[in-house]
Image (tube, grey):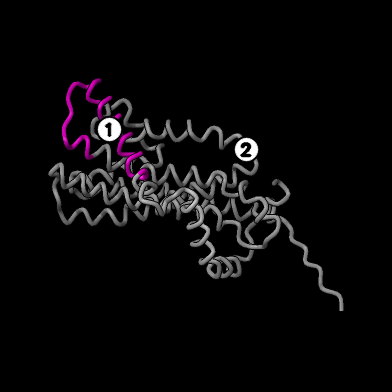
């Protein structure tokens, strides 16, 4: 008896059957974990020096920026350094998700051509790697907070929902840029400049309250502006985030996630042809 022929057509006009797709994705959660672990092992995450470098890299970078701020501004304080390190660590969670996600599909060419699985697993694995890289820096951020004598309060529990919003945003960005890179390969070369521009346009080297009124109206177009400002208010000043800031960050995070996921799933079957 001959085997039936299965024909896969690109979902260019809509989504695949989502119930079956999500079930298949859930059944392969162990693969996502192991794939992320393999990426971490390749980056020497399991070694002492590998984990130490994850902390030293953004810490040294924050020290350089702090020195630059001191030289240019002439004055600075412990709160400024706490703000710089805390927001820079969270920024690297998003930046590392973008860096890992941009080539998640194109670097998995052989796997995609030879195996049937939900392709969205690849950018998800890139975000899992970024989260594991972020966790050691979170410990250092609390240590710096204690050393500098910054205030503690129950309002710091807002850090958990803010971190979840950041993860959703990082996931949406990774999924979206991994799909875009399939069609426009130059985006991977432009990404370092895009992330560096995002760094300078976000409240990391400066606090959001220090921005002049003439520039404040442009902050709403930056997807991570209010996210980092809310993180600084909670982690550095021990204050509750503003509801407007949380709403802005949530709308951008879930908006990017929904748009990126739809764009990815609607063209997933087309990847094998493009690769």
Helix, strand, or loop for circle 2?
loop
Corner quadrant of residue 112: bottom right
Helix, strand, or loop for circle 1?
helix
Q: Is residue 110 above or below residue 236?
A: below
Q: Is residue 69 above or below residue 162?
A: above
Label 1 close to label 2 by CB (< 8 Å)? no
Instruction: Tell me if residue 30 is in the magenta stretch.
Output: no
Q: Which residue is mark 1?
A: 63
Q: Using residue 34 as the reference point, say whether residue 52 is left or right of it.
A: left
Q: Nearer the viewer, residue 141 or 23?
A: 141
Residue 229 is labelled as none
The magenta segment: 53-82
- Image quadrant in which the N terminus is located: bottom right
Q: Earlier in the sequence, mark 1 or mark 2?
A: 1
Sort mark 1 into few (<14), some (14-19) or many (20+) by Cα contacts within 10 Å: some
Q: Which tag is nearer the camera, tag 1 or tag 2? A: 1
Q: Main secondary structure of the magenta part?
A: helix
Corner quadrant of residue 24: bottom right
Q: Position of residue 188 (x, y in %)?
A: 56, 37
Residue 185 is labelled as 2
Q: Position of residue 32 (x, y in %)?
A: 52, 61
Instruction: Tell me if residue 79 is in the magenta stretch.
Output: yes
Q: Is residue 250 visible?
A: no
Q: Residue furthest bottom?
A: 1
Q: CA distance from mark 1 to mark 2?
A: 34 Å
Q: Is residue 34 visible?
A: yes
Q: Using residue 87 as the reference point, say whether residue 184 is left or right of it.
A: right
Q: Position of residue 69 (x, y in %)?
A: 25, 26
């Amino acid at each position: 008896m001959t085997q039936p022929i299965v024909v896969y057509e690109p979902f260019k006009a809509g989504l695949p059957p989502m119930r079956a797709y999500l079930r298949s994705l859930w059944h392969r959660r162990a693969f996502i974990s192991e794939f992320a672990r393999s990426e971490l092992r390749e980056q020497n995450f399991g070694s002492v020096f590998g984990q130490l470098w994850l902390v030293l890299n953004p810490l040294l970078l924050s020290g350089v920026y702090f020195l630059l701020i001191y030289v240019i501004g002439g004055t600075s304080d412990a709160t400024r350094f706490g703000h710089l390190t805390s927001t820079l660590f969270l920024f690297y969670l998003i930046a590392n998700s973008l860096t890992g996600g941009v080539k998640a599909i194109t670097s998995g060419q052989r796997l995609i051509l030879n195996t049937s699985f939900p392709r969205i697993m690849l950018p998800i694995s890139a975000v899992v790697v970024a989260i594991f890289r972020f966790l050691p820096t979170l410990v250092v951020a609390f240590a710096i907070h204690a050393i500098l004598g910054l205030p503690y309060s129950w309002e710091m529990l807002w850090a958990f929902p803010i971190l979840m919003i950041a993860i959703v945003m990082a996931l949406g960005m990774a999924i979206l840029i991994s799909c875009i890179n399939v069609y426009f390969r130059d985006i991977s070369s432009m990404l370092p400049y895009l992330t560096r521009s995002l760094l300078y346009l976000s409240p990391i080297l400066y606090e959001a309250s220090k921005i002049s009124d003439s520039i404040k109206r442009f902050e709403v177009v930056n997807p991570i502006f209010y996210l980092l400002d809310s993180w600084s208010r909670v982690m550095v000043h021990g204050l509750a985030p503003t509801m407007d800031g949380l709403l802005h960050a949530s709308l951008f995070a879930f908006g990017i996630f929904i748009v990126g996921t739809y764009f990815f799933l609607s063209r997933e079957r087309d990847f094998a042809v493009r690769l």
